[in-house]
Amino acid sequence: MITALHAEWTKLRTLAGPGWLLTATVVLTVAVSAAAAAATRCPAQLACPVDPARLSLTGVQLGQAAVAILAAGLITTEYSTGMIRTTFTATPRRFTVLGAKAALLTGVVLAAGTVAALGSLAAGRLILPGHGVTPARGLPALSLADGGVLRATLGSALYLALIALLSLGIATIVRDPAAAIAIILGLFYLVPVVAHVLAPDWYRHLEQAGPMTAGLAIQATTGLRSLPLSPWAGLGVLAAWAAGAMLAATLVLRLRDA
């Protein structure tokens, strides 16, 4: 495993794409979060049903696309170039190869996701008070000393890491770069759209089962009783998706020719 990790790390740091995609994850997440905070207004005389932490972390919904592309490319690129045969020749145990990719991917995405979440929170803390979103109006302060805000921030980094594992699993099964990315992004962004056109009961069930809609519940700090799932239960649904995808990928990788 150590040799496989070293090999995967060498691939990751010597290619330009992964570095740019990790940078894009941070930049997109912080930029979209800052834009969402800047677009929010809470007039003094009106109610302001805003969750400051969740609003400040809005950019995670776009940053995850860069994470998905990074994860998919980590293995589909090798299939498209034929390099995967060399990889399996050097490391015949395919589970070791997939495990090394998953471990390395989780580490770098967790690091980038933490930076992105903290940057988004800082942007919200800087921008929102000037738009009327303040603790004086009964809204939670954007401070890591607050348990809910800390959970939402660190949970967002965990969310991105689980998105990466889910994407890696799907990409390992599909193999084709374009098809894998299309399936992954469709799963993330199409399910919520479909849910909105269905009856309320079906909408709630899809929210509970969808990897993105369920997983993003981890960001909520207000109105927890109205959520389809509690924050940690929602992240658990995403973890189940990721575990299922990785298990299926392991079986397919073992049974199918390179």
Image (tube, rainbow, N blue to C red):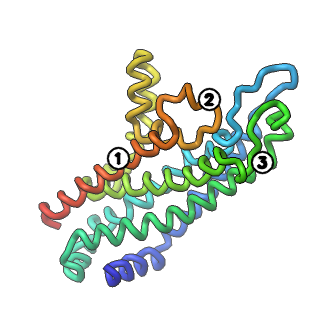
Where residue 247 appears, as percent x and y from the top left, is 25, 55
Crowding near pointer 2: few (<14 within 10 Å), some, many (20+)?
few
Q: Quadrant of residue 238?
A: top left
Q: Quadrant of residue 252?
A: bottom left
Q: Amino acid at mark 1?
A: Ala
Which label is found at residue 61? none
- Label pair 3/2, CB-CB below 8 angstroms: no
- Label pair 2/1, CB-CB below 8 angstroms: no
Crowding near pointer 1: few (<14 within 10 Å), some, many (20+)?
some
- Left or right: residue 39 versus residue 94 is right
- Left or right: residue 103 versus residue 149 is left
Q: Quadrant of residue 138?
A: top right
The residue that mark 3 highlights is: 125
Q: Nearer the viewer, residue 169 or 159?
A: 159
Q: Earlier in the sequence, mark 3 or mark 1?
A: 3
Q: CA distance from mark 2 to mark 1?
A: 25 Å
> Which mark is nearer the camera, 3 or 1?
1
- What element does badge 2 sit on? loop
Which label is found at residue 240? 1
- What element does badge 1 sit on? helix
Where residue 70 appears, as percent x and y from the top left, is 44, 61
Q: Amino acid at mark 3?
A: Arg
Q: Quadrant of the N terminus?
A: bottom left
The residue that mark 2 highlights is: 223
Residue visible at 38% across and 50% down in the picture: 181
- Left or right: residue 132 versus residue 30 is right
Where residue 135 appears, as percent x and y from the top left, is 81, 37
Crowding near pointer 3: few (<14 within 10 Å), some, many (20+)?
many
Residue visible at 37% across and 76% down in the picture: 8
